[in-house]
Amino acid sequence: VVWSRRGQILSSNPSASRTLRVSEVELRALTPDQLEQWRFIDAEGNPMPKSGLPWIAAIETGKPQESVICGMQLPDMSSTLWLSLSAVPHFKPGDAEPDMVACLFTEVTKLQRDALMFAQSQTLNTVGAWQLDFETQTLLCSAQVHSILDVPMSTPLTRERLLGHFHGHDLDRFRHALTNLQEGGFDQFEAMMTTSIGRKRRVRVRIRPLQSGANVNGIFGTMKDITTESH
């Protein structure tokens, strides 16, 4: 995407349009007020100031910006789009300040989500972490969750496969919690489950919504084996 010094999008290529899910005509037609609705977060999930955006930093400093991880939240997107962005300023002959900047980016959404989930699970020691994306219905699980379920890391887990380890009232409780969290909030409960090799375990499940602005686009959850604590 090529930006002018005044913050207007001058052009984009087909790859950029596919990634952003916006055509080049629509991108070029965006008004300053519409661009103000774009929200950006850094790799830690914190709001990014305008000065931290690669294309703006390149315009203001006149220096290239390389491989900046940035989460992009557009009004029509239900989930955060993670990008690795680089920006290269362009100078007219004889000018000391750039007149425009070319912003190049690669989508790294899955890699960033994996990294965030791993970081959160590492801080939880023996607690397993999992994340469900509503748009793609993709379920990402840490190694500890696989261990609790007695499922090899090489075996992908799905929403229904995870729920399949629970039965009766405990299964209803889990499904109810997942449905309710689509409206926001927080939930936790204890339940009995059966692992893939038939072992009975009691687990403590905690879940919270993942939000992009006002939209809930997924769920982050933790699971801890409390079988020995229950005796």
Image (tube, rainbow, N blue to C red):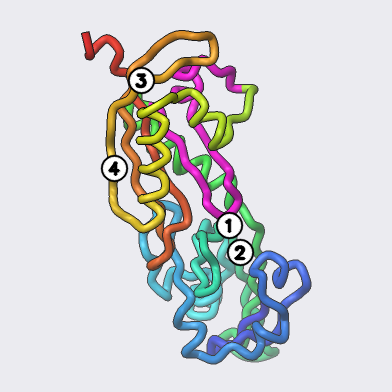
| Earlier residue among tags 1 and 2 | 1
Q: Residues within 10 Å of mark 4 (few under 14, many from 20)?
A: some
- Looking at the rendered image, the disc whose residue lies closer to the viewer, 1 or 4, is 4
Q: Residues within 10 Å of mark 2 (few under 14, many from 20)?
A: many
**Residue bearing the label numbered 3:** 192
In front: label 3 or label 4: 3
How far separated are the C-alphas under marks 3 and 4? Answer: 17 Å
> Is 106 a magenta residue?
no
Which residue appears at 58% of the width and 52% of the height? 109
In the image, residue 151 lies in the stretch drawn in magenta: yes
Q: In the rendered structure, which disc, 3 or 4, sits on the residue that comes first in sequence?
A: 4
Query: Mark 3: which secondary structure?
Result: strand
> Alpha-carbon distance for marks 2 and 4?
39 Å
Q: Are marks 2 and 4 in contact (CB under 8 Å)?
A: no
In this picture, residue 182 sits left or right of residue 14: left
The residue that appears at 50% across and 44% down in the rendered structure is 132
Instruction: Give residue 204's position: percent from left, percent from top.
Output: 30, 27
Q: Mark 1 highlights which residue?
A: 67
Magenta span of residues: 128-153
Q: Amino acid at mark 4?
A: Asp
Residue named by callout 2: 86
Disc 1 from disc 2: Cα separation: 5 Å
Res. 187 mark: 4
- Marks 3 and 2, Cα distance to the nearest angstrom? 49 Å
> Left or right: 204 with respect to 140?
left
Q: Residue at x 41, y 26 (%)?
A: 168
Instruction: Give the number of the mark in front: 3 or 1.
Output: 3
Task: Give the answer, above or below, for where 177 lies relative to 64.
Answer: above
Indicate the quadrant where residue 27 lies. Answer: bottom right
Q: CA distance from mark 3 to mark 1?
A: 45 Å
User: Looking at the image, do the residues carrying marks 3 and 1 touch, with CB atoms under 8 Å apart?
Assistant: no
